[in-house]
Amino acid sequence: MEKTGAIGGLVGGIVTRAGPVTDADVTPIDQEALARLNLRPVFVGIERDLIRAAIDEDPNAVRNRLAAVHPDEFARYDRAGGWIVPLGLERRITGET
């Protein structure tokens, strides 16, 4: 994916059943339309702090960050620094890209 966004400390983009959405500016209306078309849009991202720690070659910071518990109502954390956030009705990603 050529364009990615930075939203709430996460770096990533929107992926559907048909593949990644290459436009970094997907409006909430577009996200709802993708959900209505049953394309199951999700935001897939990784924490910016983990990327910075890896670049800075700080394995202890990465280990500590991955060991932390991340409770959330609907977002799924994959224990490797990645987040999967379902989008659609009542769930939207908005932010600067």
Image: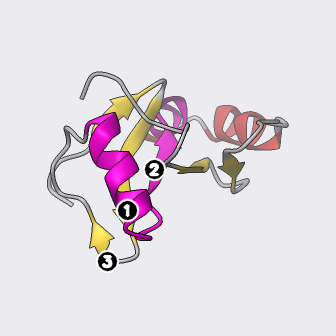
Q: Earlier in the sequence, mark 3 or mark 2?
A: 3
Left or right: 90 in relation to 17: right
| Residue located 35% across and 59% down the image | 34
Label 2 with label 1: CB-CB less than 8 Å: yes
Q: Residue furthest bottom?
A: 18
Res. 6 visible in picture? yes
Three-letter code, disc 1:
Val
Judge whether residue 39 is colored magenta: yes
Dot 3 lies on which element? loop
Residue type, numbered disc 3 = Ala
Q: Position of residue 46 (x, y in %)?
A: 50, 45
Q: Which residues are magenta?
A: 27-53
| Relative to 78, 32 lies left or right | left
At a point 67% along the width and 31% down the height, the residue shown is 61
Q: Secondary structure at mark 1?
A: strand
Marks 3 and 1 sit apart, C-alpha to C-alpha, by 8 Å
Task: In this rendered view, identify the residue nearer to me: 60 or 81.
Answer: 81
Q: CA distance from mark 3 to mark 2?
A: 14 Å
- Precedes in sequence: disc 2 or disc 1: 1
- Quarter holding residue 91: top right
The residue to which callout 3 is attached is: 18
Whether residues under marks 3 and 1 lie with C-beta atoms below 8 angstroms apart, the answer is: no
The residue tagged 2 is 43
* SS label for mark 2: strand
Decide: few, some or many residues near mark 1? Use Cα within 10 Å; few <14, some 14-19, many ≥20: many
State the residue position of label 1.
15
Residue 50, image x and y in percent? 54, 37
Q: Is residue 35 magenta-colored?
A: yes
